Image (cartoon, rainbow, N blue to C red):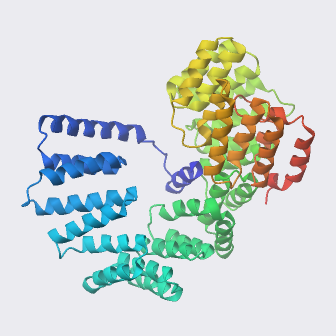
Amino acid sequence: MKHLLVLVVALASASFCAMAQTGDKINEAVMRVYDEHIAKNPGDYQTIFMRANQNFYNGNYDAAIVDVTTTIRLAPEKEKELLFDAYMLRARLYELKGNYEAEGADIDKASQINPTSLAWVDMKGKWAYAKGDYDLAKQQFNTILQQQPRNYDAMYCLGCVAAKQGNDEEAMQWVNSAIQLFPAEPQVYLNRAKLQEMQGKYEDACETYLIAMSATNDRGASIEQLFRLADNHYDDVMYALKRASDDNPRVGIFYRVRSAIALNYHHYGQALRDLKYITDNNLFEYSTIYNDEANCLFQLGDYDQAYTYANKAIAADATNPDGYILRSKIELRQGKGNNYAAAMKSIDQALVLDPNCAPALMAKARLLIAQKKYKDALPVVAKAVDADASNPEALMLRGWLNKYQLKSDAAAKADFERVLALPDNDITSLRGFALHELGRDAEATQWAEGKIAQAVPTGGEVYYYAAALQAAMGNKAQGLKYLESCLANGYGALYDVKLNDDPYVNIAPLRSEPAFKMLLDQSQLNFQER
């Protein structure tokens, strides 16, 4: 969701400050305090329950279940409020684990402790809904509405029940009633959109998300949902945004959201059209917009125009290293290419702003490698690794340098093995590439196939990486098949497809094959502004 984050930053007109590492440290400190206290006071059921809640928040569901079960065992019967909360928490945990039988039992125990609470009624209704017992679910949610006639969550749940029972008109009446009661509440719009998705009305859902985005302070929730929906219904999302922008030609946000979604799926020609409209009509003026426009032009091969917009991005925010990094890539390719001095000057400007900027260090290392200055490149890559030890790209590049240029096999192996120890969340983890360098090609191929099975094909990125992996392994026929799928899914980075030969991920070995030109010719629409 890279471009979603960039978009939120642009809309807020503020710099994005990553707080994840700080949050992790605080969380670790909190858990350490709990652990130390409970080790000394193993009977302190209240603190154990607090740790259960923290484990739940952290996503450590098994540990949370252990803690909440211990709480229930230790807490005396007089602690009714705590026991009620404990059974409700464990029921929620069992729901997340898919253990509906245990969830139902805990809901019933909670109801015995506090029969008048609507919390267990709500959970039992959602439990019945998940099990397909729609009559029981309807009964529970109606009970809530009898006591709380303006409970929009219960209205939404009744709408979902109606939809499951084939009563689409009744379903929409429930969520529309909630909107009439709470026209300024973002959640009621999000609820209607989710119900429309359930009914397969994806364009209608998009329009509802756009209403929420325009009419309420939903803190970016609608934009996040549009990005999610675009994974499998890209055309519906883009069409809804086109209608919104056609109806409101001076509302820049619709163009910005559409360009950000297009960028997220490497549809640079589509993104460029909307970015140009924004800048040509002075709807927004942010460095990120100019930078995105420059990146689109670069990926589509218009280096002179890209250079112009990269400079505009830098002029709008001279403190952001990203603008200089992109300008360096553009400068290298301008004219006859190989403009190393100009490209290096821009990278050095980025490093003046942030000497430990890993992307800038990587870009500098690649410039040195392109000039065959391998020994000079090594300490630069090493600094990038030090700046971001979890960056698989930096580790792979240092491994590549050591293995193929500096003949230090032991150091290379250590880096490839470090890549294998990193989280393997998506294709950009480069795990398959590390497996290949360690001589484990069968596992590498299996990894790529697994990622393809898990990933959203829209945009074709997963196939591009798979093609690059097969190219690196010398399997050109399979690499071309993956490239065909990549282009068929709209991959629009002409630079990556036609020119990029930077270590480590590239398809350079495929370009000499006769089928490559045919695939490129067939996919020209991918690389055009539209």
The answer to which image quadrant residue 121 occupies is bottom left
Q: Quadrant of the C terminus?
A: bottom right
Considering only vertical position in the picture, is 55 above or below 508?
below
Which residue is pictured at 64% across the width and 13% down the height?
409
Q: Nearer the viewer, residue 403 or 203?
A: 403
Q: Can you give x and y, in whole percent of width and height, for residue 228 in the image?
A: 56, 60
Q: Is residue 528 left or right of residue 103?
A: right
Q: Can you give x and y, in whole percent of width and height, for residue 396 in the image?
A: 62, 26
Q: Is residue 112 left or right of residue 106?
A: left
Which residue is pictured at 16% across the width and 37% down the height?
37
Which residue is pictured at 58% across the width and 59% down the height?
227
Q: Nearer the viewer, residue 442 or 85?
A: 442
Q: Nearer the viewer, residue 420 or 375?
A: 420
The answer to which image quadrant residue 326 occupies is top right
Asked whether residue 501 appears in the rendered view, the answer is no
Considering only vertical position in the picture, is 143 above or below 514?
below
Q: Is residue 154 left or right of residue 38?
A: right
Q: Can you give x and y, in whole percent of width and height, for residue 93 in the image?
A: 33, 56
